[in-house]
Image (cartoon, grey):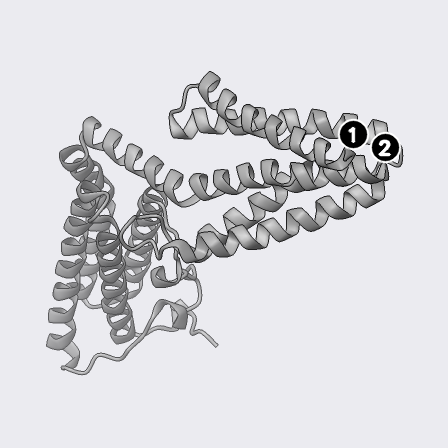
Amino acid sequence: MPKAFKDLTEREILALAITSEEEDSRTYSEYVERLKKDFPATAQMFQAMQAEEAEHRRRLIDLYTEKFGQHIPLIRRQDVSGFVTRKPVWLMKRLSINTMRHQAELMELETRTFYERAAARVTDASTRKLLIDLAEAERGHSHLAEALEQEHITPNIKKEEEEAQRRLFVLQVVQPGLAGLMDGSVSTLAPLFAAAFATHSSFDAFRVGLAASVGAGISMGFAEALSDDGSMTGRGRPLLRGIVCGLMTTAGGIGHTLPYLIPDFRIATGVAVVVVTCELLIISYVRKRYMDTPFLRAAFQVIVGGVLVFLAGILIGTL
């Protein structure tokens, strides 16, 4: 069981402070490593904060070794009750730049509170003075972060970072999702409507559409995941792209398949046509919003292709 903070000795408080400063420094180091390629200005800001934490740790070690010798016991936050449990950064595969900044603010607040509580408990004057100084330093970190942000992250750089975030989102989520949605919405039209007009049975058309949607989703998911590992293109993790692409492909086909749960064939077909129209318009909007394609051009490209596949399905179904 974690030990209560009120039961810690002065020696244990200093050991905990040393470990905490090391953990915070390594967290900032991880942020720097993740950001230096796409967000160099913010990485530089965190690098400066990492240097501050390293200096705090040095001062704590100097005081500890002067009072208690060279051996420093490994006491971590999770060993003491009252601290917030943090998920290790290395386990967070996706961590946005804004999340990192917010996490840094919480880290500084928690550390400052710890030093204030610790200073109130120790009796040694030099230890109390150092803890109070560090609490004030942590309080000033919010001002340091603001100053560093103003120094390193100018409005132009912030705009560039936001644009970089947008590009990453487009590459890693929007593009595979859009490719899947287009494939699912268009490629399943022919088998669905061919089955519908060949059998005039809503249930038979539903089964064919469901099979085509799921099959296309599996195929597109594997194709996207195996297309590249993302290391050179910046498109992110293959597994994530494959899942996004596969799910959106299935969703694109399922949308106009579900109307065939309506028993009446004519009504089901009419509803399916309306759904297809909505799907194609949504795809056109997404292409305009994220791919910078003019809406009319995107609509023309998508709708013409969809209509041709739709007509092919009806023609084959009525032969």
Which residue appears at 25% of the width and 72% of the height? 15
32 sits left or right of 230 in the view: left
Verify CB contact (< 8 Å) between mark 1 and mark 2: yes
90 sits left or right of 270 in the view: left
Which residue appears at 36% of the width and 67% of the height? 77
Of 131 and 263, the residue lying toward us? 263
Outermost residue, front direction?
319
Residue 113: mark in rendering: none
Residue 29 locus on image (x, y percent): 22, 58
Tag 1 secondary structure? helix
Residue 201 locus on image (x, y percent): 86, 39
Where, by quadrant of the figure, is residue 33 drawn? bottom left
Which residue appears at 76% of the width and 41% of the height? 195
Q: In this view, does 275 lie above or below 134?
A: above
Tag 2 secondary structure? helix
User: Residue type at mark 1?
Assistant: Thr
Residue occupied by mark 1: 269
Residue occupied by mark 2: 265
Q: How crowded is mark 1: few (under 14 residues within 10 Å), some or many (20 or more)?
A: many
Give the distance between the C-alpha atoms of the residues marked 1 and 2, in whole angstroms: 6 Å
Which residue appears at 78% of the width and 25% of the height? 270
267 sits left or right of 217 in the view: right
Of 209 and 239, the residue lying toward us? 209
Q: In this view, does 267 lie above or below 102?
A: above
Tell me if residue 250 can be seen. Answer: yes
Where, by quadrant of the figure, is residue 194 drawn? top right
Where, by quadrant of the figure, is residue 169 drawn? top left
User: Residue type at mark 2?
Assistant: Phe
Of 309 and 38, the residue lying toward us? 309
